[in-house]
């Protein structure tokens, strides 16, 4: 049935029972290719839940190595992995969760030179990067390539998420036209973060990716989710396209990817996160 | 009545009786009839109820032997 | 004092004014009981262990089943057939050796509930059926333990915090269990795998706020979530003076019988 093995039927039975997923949806997930950029606080829950859900192919971009300070929130890694490439540590954990998952590891730094080819082979891209330059680069590349992008950001107790489907809603620049001026966001080395906030945003991103892949429900297109974990407030705000958006507006000024240095305005260290719109 | 598809679920237990019935229902066309044979007693109630919850038309549920039941269901919509 | 390793490990907490070194020490001294090491318990346990909660009790009678792996990220293929508490303990210790994991390989029932709760500061409910949920709510109220409640169904979930003496209890919201048959039996329901991920993570966040005494916990507020719509709502909920458990003249003063709605043991963990 749908070419499922007996084992797959059992493993994914809770999905198959759902009318909105069913055998058809589960088969679609198995055929799907998702790129997760960043194997850190956001990328950990995204990758683990997509692997568990039965996504066929997961690409993972990260060039960093596991540090002890990651383990307060990055579930993909363990204490014994300290010093190792994050993609390698992630490979072990994800393969243990689901041996049928095809993993494509990209231990590279995201740049204007490689971003287009990195995203090209995937159906959906999930942003788990930790700095503004990479976030703007990824947004611009996905808009130019017409690739759905599930955006997520974090700072301290705050988080945000939105889903960008080029052509049918705003992009990250429509909401945040330019990177914040230096000093407007606490410098990266000062900002802490609560691990569970990363978990909340990452699991929202995994949900959005699955909805886009299956074409079910109402994804966060034209809406921005903001979360304040400390206050316990979870809100979605409607957000339209900006006609003057430099990348997806009526007269775009960004028509090709520039050097990453040009994106490197606010922060040259990992750790910067999000602002509430 | 003739079934368009048959599913032998003898030896299978819940929830997989319904999971497999659902997969078969997804694969047949609207209006076609699926015949399911089960021998797990709770499935005799659970599977038809779940099929109806999903909007299908359960045509009959009857014993066809010692501890064996046949469920006939027509796919709707 | 923190070791050099702990300073590195918890640096992102120590940087937060709301946590700091004092908050991190509080977390390391805290004792949390997780009921269920399934869909909700997986992310809750993971994030509490990562955060450095010093003692994590995990209570679950089940073994890992293949149908769990679609959402229960604490467990892996190699754990099939293994007690969930053992599989969980292994992952949590590998993540953070500072955490003392206490395995309770048992279900919670009226006979053991109060003893189980006694050693913990706070309880997180990750159980999957109404009978157990009422038992847990009653036991926590009677024992005066804060309870972080979470539940899921298909694409929807909810979280709230019950703080005895402040705000409502579970029975203020749902005085009686639903009649048998009204709620689809467990095997009919299905669940989006990542749904318990969100709900369990929100539960972890609420537990940390309670342990640290920071922010505004979801006391008297019921957070509801719809994954398909990606909508969150917060409903104000109030203590019911006529509540049979926490009202002015309560009729429930000891744990009762809870055998209804769903055969315990027949249900998969949330």
Image (tube, coloured by chain):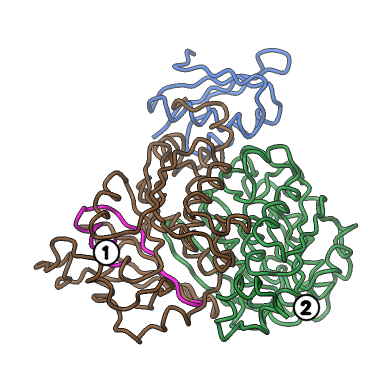
Chain colours: A brown, B blue, C green
> Measuring 83% from the left and 79% from the top, which residue is drawn there?
C249
At label 1, counting other C-alpha atoms closer than 10 Å, the crowd grade (few under 14, some 14-19, many 20 or more) is many
Q: Eyeballing the image, is A163 above or below B49?
A: below
Give the magenta range.
A135-157
Residue B39 placement (x, y as % from top left): 68, 21
Q: Eyeballing the image, is C212 above or below A116?
A: below
Report helix, strand or loop for mark 1: helix
At label 2, counting other C-alpha atoms closer than 10 Å, the crowd grade (few under 14, some 14-19, many 20 or more) is some
Please indicate, yes or no, whether residue B51 appears anywhere in the rendered image.
yes
> Measuring 70% from the left and 78% from the top, which residue is drawn there?
C2
Within the magenta stretch, is there residue A138? yes
Quarter occupied by residue A70: bottom right
Q: Identify the residue under disc 1.
A: A137
Residue B30 placement (x, y as % from top left): 38, 28
Do the residues indicated by labels 1 and 2 lie within the same chain of the protein? Answer: no
Q: Identify the residue under disc 2.
A: C247
- Could you tell whether C268 is left or right of A146 in the image? right
Residue C140 placement (x, y as % from top left): 79, 69
Give C156 or C85, whichever is nearer the viewer: C85
User: Are the residues at dot 1 and dot 2 in contact (C-beta closer than 8 Å)?
Assistant: no
Q: Nearer the viewer, mark 1 or mark 2?
A: 1
Residue A269 placement (x, y as % from top left): 39, 73
Within the magenta stretch, is there residue A40? no
- On what subunit does the disc labeled 2 rest? C
What quarter of the picture does the N terminus of chain C occupy? bottom right
- Could you tell whether C84 is left or right of B35 in the image? right
> Measuring 75% from the left and 48% from the top, which residue is drawn there?
C86
Q: Eyeballing the image, is B14 above or below A128?
A: above
Please indicate, yes or no, whether residue C239 appears anywhere in the rendered image.
no
| Spatial CA span between label 1 and label 2 | 57 Å
């Amino acid at each position: 049935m749908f070419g499922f093995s007996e084992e797959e039927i059992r493993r994914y039975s809770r999905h198959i029972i759902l009318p909105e997923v069913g055998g058809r949806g589960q088969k679609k997930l198995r055929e799907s290719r998702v790129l997760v950029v960043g194997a850190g606080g956001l990328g950990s829950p995204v990758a683990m839940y997509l692997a568990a859900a039965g996504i066929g192919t997961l690409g993972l971009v990260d060039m960093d190595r596991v540090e002890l300070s990651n383990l307060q929130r990055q579930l993909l890694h363990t204490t014994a992995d300290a010093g190792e490439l994050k993609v390698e540590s992630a490979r072990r954990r994800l393969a243990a969760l689901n041996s049928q998952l095809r993993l494509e590891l990209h231990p590279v730094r995201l740049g204007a030179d490689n971003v287009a080819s990195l995203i090209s082979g995937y159906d959906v891209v999930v942003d788990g990067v930790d700095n503004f330059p990479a976030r703007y680069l990824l947004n611009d590349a996905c808009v130019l390539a017409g690739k759905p992008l599930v955006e997520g950001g974090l700072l301290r107790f705050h988080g945000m998420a939105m889903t960008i489907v080029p052509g049918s809603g705003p992009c990250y620049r429509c909401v945040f036209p330019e990177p914040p001026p230096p000093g407007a966001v606490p410098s990266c080395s000062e900002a802490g973060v609560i691990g569970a906030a990363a978990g909340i945003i990452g699991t929202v991103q995994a949900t959005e990716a699955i909805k886009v892949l299956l074409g079910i429900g109402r994804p966060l297109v034209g809406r921005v989710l903001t979360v304040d974990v400390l206050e316990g407030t979870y809100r979605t705000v409607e957000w339209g396209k900006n006609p003057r958006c430099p990348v997806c507006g009526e007269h775009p000024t960004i028509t090709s990817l520039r050097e990453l240095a040009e994106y490197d305005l606010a922060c040259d260290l990992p750790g910067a996160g999000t602002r509430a719109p | 009545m003739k079934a368009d598809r048959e599913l032998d679920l003898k030896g299978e237990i819940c929830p997989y009786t319904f999971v497999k019935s659902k997969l078969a229902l997804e694969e047949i066309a609207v209006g076609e009839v699926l015949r399911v044979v089960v021998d797990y007693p709770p499935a005799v109630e659970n599977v038809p109820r779940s099929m109806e919850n999903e909007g299908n038309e359960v045509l009959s549920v009857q014993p066809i032997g010692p501890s064996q039941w046949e469920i006939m269901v027509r796919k709707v919509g | 004092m923190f070791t050099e390793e702990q300073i590195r490990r918890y640096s992102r907490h120590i940087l937060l004014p709301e946590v700091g070194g004092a908050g991190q020490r509080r977390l390391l001294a805290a004792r949390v009981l997780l009921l269920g090491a399934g869909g909700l318990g997986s992310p809750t346990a993971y994030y509490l262990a990562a955060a450095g909660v010093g003692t994590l009790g995990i209570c679950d009678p089940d073994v890992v089943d293949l149908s769990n792996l679609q959402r229960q990220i604490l467990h892996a293929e190699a754990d099939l057939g293994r007690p969930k508490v053992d599989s969980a303990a292994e992952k949590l210790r590998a993540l953070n050796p500072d955490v003392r994991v206490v395995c309770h390989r048992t279900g919670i029932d009226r006979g053991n509930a109060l003893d189980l709760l006694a050693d913990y500061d706070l309880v997180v409910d990750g159980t999957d059926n109404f009978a157990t949920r009422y038992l847990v709510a009653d036991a926590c109220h009677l024992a005066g333990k804060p309870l972080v409640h979470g539940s899921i169904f298909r694409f929807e979930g909810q979280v709230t915090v019950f703080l005895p003496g402040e705000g409502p209890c579970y029975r203020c919201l749902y005085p009686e269990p639903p009649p048998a048959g009204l709620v689809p039996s467990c095997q009919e329901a299905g669940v989006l795998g990542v749904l318990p991920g969100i709900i369990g993570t929100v539960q972890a966040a609420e537990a940390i706020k309670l342990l640290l005494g920071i922010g505004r916990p979801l006391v008297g507020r019921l957070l509801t979530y719809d994954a398909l719509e990606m909508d969150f709502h917060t409903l104000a909920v109030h203590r019911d003076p006529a509540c049979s458990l926490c009202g002015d003249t309560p009729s429930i003063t000891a744990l009762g019988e809870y055998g209804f709605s769903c055969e315990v043991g027949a249900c998969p963990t949330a």
